[in-house]
Amino acid sequence: MRSLDIGATGMMAQQTNVDVISNNIANMTTTGFKRQRASFQDLMYQNITRPGSTSSDAGTVAPSGIQLGLGVRTGGVYRMNGQGPIQVTENTLDLAITGEGYFQIQRPNGDIAYTRDGTFQLNQNGEIVNAQGYLLDPGITIPSDATSIDINASGEVLVKTAAATASQNLGQIQLAGFINPAGLEAIGDNMFLETDASGAPTAGNPGTNELGSLRQHALERSNVNVVEEITQLIAAQRSYEMNSKVISTSDEMLQTTAQLR
Amino acid sequence: MENSLYIGLSKQIALRNNMDTIANNIANMNTGGYRAQNLMFEEYLRKTKGDPDPMSFVSDRGQYENTENGPLQQTENPLDIAVTGPGFIGIQGPGGKVAYSRAGSLHMDASGQLLNIANFPVANAGGSTITIPAGSTEIKIDEKGVVSNQDGQIDQIMLVEFADTKNLKPAGNTLYETDSPPLPASNTRIKQGMIEGSNVKPVLEMTRMVDTLRTYQSVQNVLQSENDRLRSVIQKLTKQ
């Protein structure tokens, strides 16, 4: 019976749905996390009678055919890249991006990863590194006798040392923008890699060319909306139950068939 | 005269084997690194004397595995590894022959030798065993299988891929055996602190079980009505 397999595809699709929702809820407090959403498509159709086939010698066409659907499948799981809320912290090197753009991180194997997570710290050489110790790209080194570090909205790093009275501009933090940020490949640890789907990155100063500006002493929290996730979870659970009802009804119908006689 | 009984019997035997495979899958739903197995059936045609149409029976053709990667579970145990990608790790199987496995719950024995969950030693790249020196505090296993402790690198776990995974025969105890030559792993990574669960999908196994059960009942119906037909033939034709 087709309905047995169709019910099974429905249950598996809702399982994927619940997996995506639970990942969102688990990452509710992850800095810079962007929530995902699973979208479903109907599986192919089996043509018993093709729509548009002729119904008589005179060339009359039947208005509609007979097409039986075969279930559902996951069409895609994509990220919603809306801005998350900004949380003010007291950390000197905590940066939040308000707007588009990603920080560039240099991975140990040489390629560049992109992230929205702005929790930076200094390593033993005074270079700005992220939580894993990977360097920010382009690298900025803070001298060891710096008394205060200020990063303005355009990403310029200004330090005051005990020796000089005026602040010294050490460089400018750059952001990378993508034509299609939803096409970035997530590799975990809050980092993304560029792919053919996302397009090539265009690096620039914060605040220029539609790139967002930076805010120091602040972090961008995850954009997961808990109420919406729980509502989706309830809908997924009920859908799962109803698909299981389809399977048990098909089972009963097959039992009736087997008992014919 | 009883040909239809034998045809029905062949189907029931095939369904019984199918049910065994499904039960095995469901029993191993939580076994790390287990891959769901399916049976293939084919039509077996047999010519009959005097009849132009051959009779068709069912026969088991073979068994194949679902090679999808299972879900990763985090355990935080430094000796638990998950193999992500199409590859396998090498294990020194019974008799010293190298076997391959996806199950990554490793532990150490009293002498520091790295063993898998069935107490077979894990093979290094050359085929012999890996021993972790006493007094190692932080054991790290990186993506390529390099095992290191706080003093530096110790050894490397054998990580291989195969061009054709059809030739891997399950040998029990989470091991696979094959004669095909292994290739160096290019797309496979080891993740420490995680285990790969089994890739059995309970929903699919239950629907196959329902399907098998109802088909079994239908065939039983056929056998029953054949039986009644034969009995009434014998009764009617032998009435005096």
Image (cartoon, coloured by chain):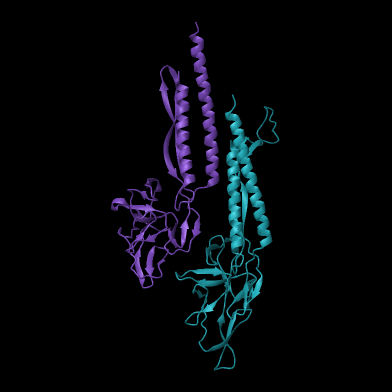
Chain colours: A cyan, B purple
Q: What is the tally of numbered marks visible in this picture? A: 0
Relative to residue A192, is residue A40 drawn left or right? right
Q: Which residue lies furthest to the left in this view?
A: B95
- Toward the viewer: A105 or A65? A105
Q: Position of residue A116 (x, y in %)?
A: 59, 70
Q: Is residue A113 above or below residue A139?
A: above
Is residue A115 placed above or below B18 in the rendered structure? below
Percent coordinates x, y for residue B34 in the rendering: 45, 50
The residue depicted at 54 percent of the width and 26 percent of the height is B221
Q: In the image, A53: left or right of B135? A: right
Horizontally, residue B86 falls left or right of residue A96, namely left
Q: Is residue A72 visible?
A: no
Q: Where is residue B204 in the image (x, y as percent from the top left)?
A: 54, 44
Residue B37 figure quarter = top left
Can you name the residue that lies furthest to the front here? Answer: B110
Which quadrant: the C terminus of chain A? top right
Give above or below for A130 relative to B75. Answer: below
Residue B121 visible in the shown view: yes
Front residue of B49/A242: it is A242
* Percent coordinates x, y for residue B47 in the rendering: 41, 23
Q: In which quarter of the image is the N terminus of chain A?
A: top right
Image point 68% across, 56% down: which residue?
A231
What residue lies at 50% left-to-right and 87% top-to-bottom? A144
